[in-house]
Amino acid sequence: MNEYIVLDKSYLQGAPGDELRTLAETRRLLVSAALFYELLTTSPEVRRKCFRRLPQIRNPVVLFEHIGVLLRREVDTGSPAGRPSENSLDFPFEFNRGLVTDSYSLPEEALRVLKEQTADVEGDIDRLIAYSETIGQLFPGLLMGTATTVCELRRDAYATICDLSWIRQFYEDISTNESDYPFPRIHHAHFSWTHIRWLQVNLLFALDLHIRHAGRLRRNLTTDLRVRLEHDVHDAQILALGVLEGELATRESKLQKWHLLLQSGDVEQSGHAAD
């Protein structure tokens, strides 16, 4: 069993108190910048409840920045970046006690950082929308035909995304054709690379959005839907980190299934056989 486990907001907010306390006592909780952003931008009531559920001690969790840190390391070194826990922030800290109150106001520096992160999130949302518009070219026929045929095609699409040979070739294709990003050359241990896992996660989210919105995500876009897409952006980062770490604490069934799917590569075992 891995010492570290990536924490998701749904688990922090919704897990029974005894279960969360046991997890905190037996594992080291890995909190990413994506989760921290969600906690600082949610309602004061939810923020207070979530921070109260974390251990009120020195270094209550292990902090990690974001997926971009691992991607940049792979570009710079030409090697897998390793697990998030191996790239965590190492310094003594305690959470501001004001975070467990409804009246806490973020300092100006924190607001400035959040503003910068919000701009990054908006860009990630736009990219996710674009991915959902092109996924149908990779997996045609997902939206038409008999119920049985469509179910089989969708099942095959999930299985394909997790297939080593296919994802290796797809990565080679996009890295060859994309000149604006310095893709590292990957020759071995493909599933240990952040670039491969991040690509798989983005394909899973794009596939899901393409199916749920019948290929018309941009046309159906509303303010409320864009908010839900923001949650997807954060969930994608947390899922990728959980897959790389090998452990993920979440109460969202979609993330549970995808985490199992990416770990095992088994569509039947992960519960996608009937999707």
Image: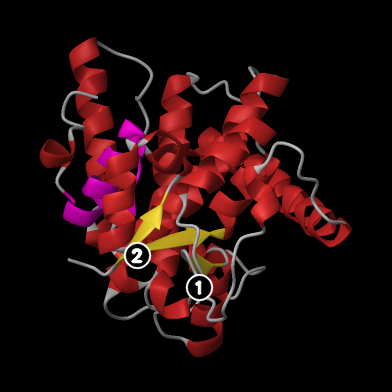
Q: Is residue 256 magenta?
A: yes
Type of amino acid under label 1: Leu
On screen, residue 21 versus residue 54, left or right, reads left
Pick whichever, 237 or 215, lies toward us.
237
Task: Give the structural element (helix, strand or loop) at label 2.
Answer: helix
Residue at x 45%, y 52% (from the top left corner): 238
The image quarter containing residue 116 is bottom right
* Above or below: residue 148 compared with residue 9: above
The residue wearing badge 2 is: 244
Task: Give the structural element (helix, strand or loop) at label 1.
Answer: helix
The residue wearing badge 1 is: 70
Pick whichever, 120 or 210, lies toward us.
120
Of pointers 1 and 2, the one earlier in the residue sequence: 1
Type of amino acid under label 2: Leu
Residue 198 locus on image (x, y percent): 44, 58
Within 10 Å of disc 2 (Cα), the crowding (few <14, some 14-19, many 20+) is: many
Q: Is residue 259 magenta?
A: yes
On screen, residue 193 versus residue 188, left or right, reads right
- In the rendered structure, are the residues bearing label 1 and label 2 in contact, judged by CB atoms less than 8 Å apart? yes
Residue 221 locus on image (x, y percent): 67, 21
The residue segment tinted magenta is: 248-265
Q: How is the image coloured?
A: secondary structure
Residue 43 seen in the figure: no
Quarter holding the C terminus is top left
* Residue extending farthest bottom: 77
Residue at x 23%, y 22% (from the top left corner): 151
The image quarter containing residue 207 is top left
Residue 25 locus on image (x, y percent): 29, 60
On screen, residue 62 versus residue 188, left or right, reads right
* Residue extending farthest right: 108
* Residue extending farthest left: 269
